[in-house]
Amino acid sequence: MVLSRWLSPRALVLHLVGAAWVAGCALAADWQVGRAIQGNEFSYLYAIEWPVFAVAGIVGWWALVHTDPASSKERSARRAAEAAMRERAHVARRDRAVEDAELAAYNDHLAELAAADKPKGWRR
């Protein structure tokens, strides 16, 4: 499992893209340091910014390599089941409650958002 995580075709592409990203950030940082030495005061800030971008790229690469596609499918199925449960509960509540038209429209909109099969976060 460990080797398949690091040597799968998807992982190899991520390794290449990550290496290109970090190398590009290193080149840009070196360029900005040279400009800063020549007297461009803004380049000091940019010389710090590019290594931060490189670190953000490394964090993103790490997260993408460690995301298990099978668990993503399981999370999607779980979200669908939870949305179906919320919809059933919403219909049951709605049958019992008397709502004005504006509140009913708003609640319908919220139910549609809850039932949508879209990830609601970065890793969910």
Image (cartoon, rainbow, N blue to C red):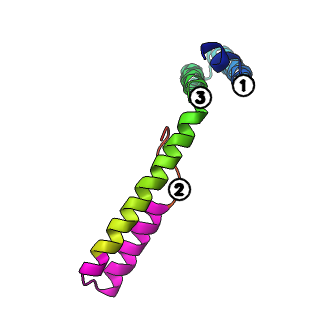
Q: Which mark is residue 17?
A: 1
* Three-letter amino acid code at the position of disc 1: Val
| Magenta segment main secondary structure | helix
Q: Is residue 92 visible?
A: yes
Q: Is residue 58 left or right of residue 112?
A: right
Give the numbered dot on residue 64: 3
Displayed quadrant of residue 8 = top right
Q: Is residue 37 visible?
A: no
Q: What's drawn in magenta, residue-wise?
A: 94-115
Q: Amino acid at mark 2?
A: Asp
Of pointers 2 and 3, the one earlier in the residue sequence: 3
Please state, as top left, top right, bottom left or bottom right, where the N terminus lies in the image. top right
Q: What is the spatial separation of the Cα atoms under label 3 and label 1, in whole angstroms? A: 12 Å
| Disc nearest the viewer among 1 and 2 | 2
Image coordinates of residue 12 in percent, x first then y, are 73, 21
Amino acid under disc 3: Leu
